[in-house]
Image (spheres, rainbow, N blue to C red):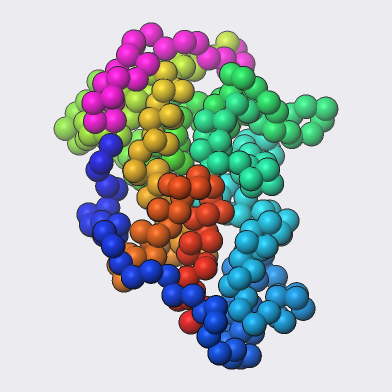
């Protein structure tokens, strides 16, 4: 996919290289301000004596990325970004648990979405478990049940949206509570609804058709295999199941874009600005080369502009 989720691209070719402060005359006040900013951004805490005593605190970003306080803070940040509210139980917040695992073990960021794991309760505790049939946290039973939705034919529109949102950042506004809206499959084909459900690369109904279907047996939720067959999705790719769907999404430029947008939001509390295009480009390049979310964060926080 080559489309963008925004009306303009911040990924302009070229741009000035990162301006390192290494080798510049030491300014104790600037160094202290930089240490405070980095420590609060990454760990939510004041800097320790070692960071305060560093002439150029930005040389310590890699150490901050290995700090357990950062891992906890970033895992909570991702969970808040990927869910509209906290889960009713800890195991429903599968993104939090698997993010923590991925960061702790320095795994590629794609492992959060396509890795051979599941998050579930084992031995009375929520654990990340190896699972050869796993798909990041997307096949974790508590997560599947949380986002199974209530569509009358068991079509998992909510699951489809969460997969799209978590991997690419796409945001859609539901209208299920609007007066007079027909939420059946036929109603979703109406002019006001089909733009999100049947047209475009993120068409929810067509994407949900390759996912398993929700089945209610009394109060028990189970899932059965999809029956629609392979679908042409995501601007022309033939996709048969959830694994092929997620693999295609994380291979897209939208996934790289969303990852660096998450890096900016974590560090700055906002999306990137147009004037920060060169930094954003470097973030994408670093992430593409090294595959870890840490590389994206380092590209942003390691730029001299972060401590100005």
- Numbered range of the magenta stretch: 218-240
Of residues 120 and 52, which is closer to you in this image? 52
Percent across and percent down for residue 201 are 26, 33
Q: Residue at x 49, y 55 (%)?
A: 296
On screen, residue 195 versus residue 228, left or right, reads left
Query: 295 above or below 199?
Result: below
Q: Is residue 220 magenta?
A: yes
Of residues 106 and 258, which is closer to you in this image? 106
Percent across and percent down for residue 183 are 32, 27
Residue 18 visible, this orientation: yes
Q: Is residue 73 magenta?
A: no
Percent across and percent down for residue 126 are 74, 34
Q: Quadrant of residue 116?
A: top right
Residue 82 visible, this orientation: no
Q: What residue occupies the far left of the structure in this picture?
A: 191
Percent across and percent down for residue 111 are 56, 36
Q: Residue at x 42, y 70 (%)?
A: 18
Of residues 11 and 99, which is closer to you in this image? 11
Q: Quadrant of residue 51?
A: bottom right
């Amino acid at each position: 996919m080559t489309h963008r989720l925004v009306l303009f691209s911040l990924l302009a070719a070229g741009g000035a290289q990162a301006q390192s402060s290494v080798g510049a005359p030491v300014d104790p006040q600037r160094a202290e301000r930089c240490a405070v900013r980095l420590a609060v951004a990454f760990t939510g805490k004041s800097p320790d004596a070692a960071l305060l005593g560093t002439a150029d605190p930005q040389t310590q970003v890699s150490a901050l990325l290995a700090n357990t306080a950062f891992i906890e803070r970033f895992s909570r940040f991702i969970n808040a970004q990927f869910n509209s509210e906290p889960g009713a139980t800890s195991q429903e917040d599968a993104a939090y648990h698997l993010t923590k695992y991925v960061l702790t073990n320095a795994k590629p960021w794609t492992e959060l979405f396509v890795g051979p794991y599941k998050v579930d309760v084992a031995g009375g505790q929520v654990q990340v478990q190896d699972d050869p049939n796993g798909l990041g946290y997307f096949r974790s039973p508590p997560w599947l049940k949380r986002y199974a939705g209530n569509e009358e034919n068991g079509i998992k529109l909510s699951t489809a949206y969460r997969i799209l949102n978590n991997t690419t950042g796409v945001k859609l506004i539901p209208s299920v509570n609007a007066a007079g809206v027909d939420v059946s499959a036929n109603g979703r084909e109406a002019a006001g609804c089909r733009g999100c459900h049947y047209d475009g690369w993120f068409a929810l109904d067509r994407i949900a058709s390759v996912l398993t279907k929700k089945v209610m047996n009394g109060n028990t939720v189970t899932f059965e295999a999809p029956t629609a067959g392979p679908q042409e999705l995501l601007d022309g790719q033939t996709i048969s199941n959830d694994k092929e769907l997620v693999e295609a999404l994380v291979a897209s430029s939208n996934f790289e874009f969303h990852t660096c947008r998450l890096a900016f939001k974590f560090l700055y509390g906002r999306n990137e600005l147009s004037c920060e295009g060169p930094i954003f480009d470097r973030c994408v390049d670093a992430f593409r080369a090294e595959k870890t979310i840490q590389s994206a964060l380092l590209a942003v926080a390691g730029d001299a502009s972060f401590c100005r």
